[in-house]
Structure formats: structure tokens, C-alpha cells
Amino acid sequence: MYSTIPHWINGSATEGDSPNRGDVFNPATGAVARTVPLASVADVNAGVAAAKAAFPAWGNTSLAKRTAVMFAFRELFNARKDELAAIITAEHGKVLSDAAGEIARGLEVLDFACGIAHLSKGEYSENVSTGVDVYSLQQPLGVVSIISPFNFPAMVPMWFFPMAVAAGNTVVLKPSEKDPSASLWMAELFTEAGLPDGVFNVVHGDKLAVDTLLEHPDVASVSFVGSTPIAKYIYETAAHHGKRVQALGGAKNHMLVLPDADLDLVADSAVNAGFGSAGERCMAISVVVAVEPVADELIAKVSERMSTLKVGDGTRSCDMGPLITQQHRDKVAGYIELAEADGSTVVVDGRGIEIDGDANGFWLGPTLIDNVSTDSDVYKHEIFGPVLGVIRVQSYEEGLALINSSQYGNGTAIFTNDGGAARRFQREVEVGMVGINVPIPVPVAFFSFGGWKDSMFGDTKAYGPDAIRFFTRQKAVTSRWLDPSHGGINLGFPQSDA
């Protein structure tokens, strides 16, 4: 593994010309493990220039050859995925099983992209007017950029680049500078699979690199996943510069629990969805909305399960690893202090938890807070850590109104054995992804991922059918092949025959 994690531009590793470096930590030890160059404007320009130069040939490469490269990449990726899981655990901190799960979901999108020959078919209508046919073509955009977050260093980039590359575009990926090695690993593997130089480029960096991509005249589109304020900034800035944008923002995902629900299933689901990956998931359940009289019993069951969780180094046999940085750990812990100050009840406190790992790691254990006020920042903010809140309501209607009043509309779930209530919920809730007795309703790759309201900026979601629409532009062709008996000159506006 590199001690300094380089950019990947035009098929080779380079540290660029910027003297600026960022630290990449091992979150389980608190130690600086590697450094990463933070790109200058010239470094970003070099990545975009490589992608621009590679586009004409790649965009004109046959579907058969593009598909062959995607299949080769898929086979190499699957054979060596354990390497990638170890890289993710070392830099992000999530346990190996969670890293493997992330990779498996990314592979789903790669599998879907291998069907690009079918997915990119246009439409054809014969003889719309006498001797006139109309058909559509799906053609690539050109250079596309992807700006991805730290929490899924493999899966989130794979939501976008397999579809973008398969469709004939070239890519500049700007991964999180907190855990950048996964992107470099994928770039090297893509080259081994036969992808031409310049088609897939990785440029590390901070806000300077992001802004350069947003404003670059040769970048056709921007795909982003991150917090809502940044997503809104990305959307507005890139759109102002004439780019196609999909910007997925933050979340505050609610789990509505009706009195008839199986509380053992609910408790298992709340723990799994609340504390997996240390709560650093945009689809994590962060609020349990319990319709009385089930709250006390449910809290007891959740607390019991939390007591069995083992927190520690992700390379060991643990359930939950550290948070990504000390700064983020302290920010999340601050919400627990705020909850106490606001009069909520901290039922299980993750501060000072016993851990299986180095004491200098960025540790915060699973935390459960009851009687969370909707006026508190503990409720209103996306905490992005292992903090699960409980709000008590008196009816389905009250719980639904609470969820619909949130500024976010990313994911939600209902737990009930009443089919009518579930059907009503899926219709009435104002959220983009809904689970029915499923706590993390991330759609499979042949559907599309994305929320509503302040959780999504742009018109198309990630992966699935929306990816084809986003990474291609349609061209409609109206065609007539004249025979010797054509009718000559007619300056009237062309009309369809009756």
C-alpha cells in the first residue's frame, strides 16, 4: 500500500504538483497511516484533460468491446474483493463484514452495468409519415465528475462510475480525502481489466478540487453524495455553470413502529440499522417513532441487544468499529451532551465504553436516547454517528405527520403486521425510499436510489434506470430515404400525413 496515496491520471499514478498534503488516519489507532496529495487547479485540469482526450475513442468504442471491459473488471473485482475490504477497514474503521457488504452492493451496480447493450437501446417508429421513420439514440455526455463521501469509499463511487463508463463517458472521480485508497485500488484494477488510459481518473483533494470540477468548462455532469448543505452548494454551483447535476444530500431516517409490530424484529432492526458502520450511513435509522403503548417494552429490548455489542478494531471479531476522525467523534459525542441538556433521557451512553482496540482510536459506543424533543438539534440535525433517538407518539397519524414534517425525505420504514396500514404508509409518507418491515430500504441495482425534499437535488436518482438517463443524452432522428418519385420542392411547414 502506498505511503502517499497518489492521483490516477491517464492510466498511471502521480502525486501531482501541489505541495499540500492531507493525513489519512487509521481510526482504530488514531495514528496517521498515510498521506494524500490535495490537488492543485493544475492537477484537476490534468485529470479533466486526460478524460477529455480519451472520450472520442471510448465514446465510439462498440458496445461489445465496452461490455467486455466491464465483464473483465467485474471478474477481477470479485476475485480480489477481500483486498478492498481490508483497505476500507484500515481507513474508514468499519468492521470487515460491513466492508464486505458495502462491496457486495457496489458489485450489484457493476453487474447491472454489464447489461449496457440492452439498457442503452433507443426507440424506433416506422412510417410515422409516408416514407419517414423516427428513432432515438442514447449517446454519452463526455467527461463526467463524481464527488464521493467518506462513509462508503467503494460503494458510493460504484453507484455512478460503472454506468458512466459503460455508457461511453470518461470519468474524473474525487473521493473523500479521509479514505482515498479504495478509489486508487479500483482505478488500477480497471486498467488491468483493459480500460484505455484516461477513461477513469482519480484526483484527490479538498474544496479547491471540488470547486475546480464544478466550474470546469470541459466537465459535463456532476454526481455527488454528502451532507445537505454541501449537496445544495454542489447543485447550485454546478448548475450555474451549465452542468447536469445529481446531488444526494443528508437524512434523518425514521422508523415508525405500530403497536401490532413484532417488537423482537423491531429491536433487532433498530440496532442493526442504527449502529451498523457506527451510524455513518445516509440510510441509517436515527429516530424510532414508537406508537404507544410499546415504547417502554421496545426500549428495554433495544437496550438488551445493545449490551451485547462489541466495539473495537474492525479487523477483529467486533460488531462496530470507530468513527472516521477524532473531530467527528467529538462532534457526535456533543449531541449526547446536548440531549442531556435538553431534558432527554440517555438510556445507553456510548461515551467511555469499553473497547477492544487501541485506546487512542476514535471510539464512541452505541447510544440510545429516549424522549427526544423535536425542537432539539439532536432531532433536527443529521448526527451521522451511533446515536439512536426515540420519540413517543399516540397514533399512526401523529407519527406520519412527524415524519412528513421533516426537511429530509431520504429513507423511512414502518414496522407492522397490518397490511392495510403498511399500504397506507407507503402511499402517504413523503419520503423517497420506504421499507415495510425492512429497516434499510436501499433499492437493488435495477431500481434507482434517491430521496425527496432536502435529501436530493436534481431530477435523476443514482444507478438503475435513472443512471442511463443521467449519463446519456437522447438524440431523436427523423429519417426519409427518397425514391425517384419524390414530390419536389415544398416550402410549407412539414406535417404528418393524415
Image (cartoon, rainbow, N blue to C red):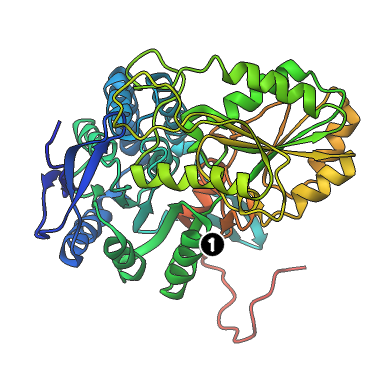
Q: Residues within 10 Å of mark 1 (few under 14, many from 20)?
A: few
- Judged from the image, the secondary structure of the residue bearing numbered disc 1 is strand
In front of the other: 128 or 308: 308
**Residue 150 in the image, given as x and y percentages of width and height:** 37, 43
Residue 145 as seen in the image, left or right of residue 276 = left
Q: Quadrant of residue 315?
A: top left
Disc 1 residue type (three-letter):
Ala
Q: Quadrant of residue 143?
A: bottom left
User: Which quadrant of the rendered structure holds the N terminus?
Assistant: top left
Residue 75 as seen in the image, left or right of residue 423 = left
Residue under the image location 77 percent in, 19 percent down = 263
> Visible in this render: residue 181?
no
Residue under the image location 43 percent in, 41 percent down = 156
**Residue 81 in the image, given as x and y percentages of width and height:** 32, 22
User: Which quadrant of the rendered structure holds the C terminus?
Assistant: bottom right
> Visible in this render: residue 346?
yes
Identify whether 23 is placed above or below 137.
above
In front of the other: 252 or 44: 252
Q: Which residue is mark 1?
A: 476
Identify whether 483 is placed above or below 82.
below
Residue under the image location 29 percent in, 67 percent down = 212
Residue 239 as seen in the image, left or right of residue 452 = left
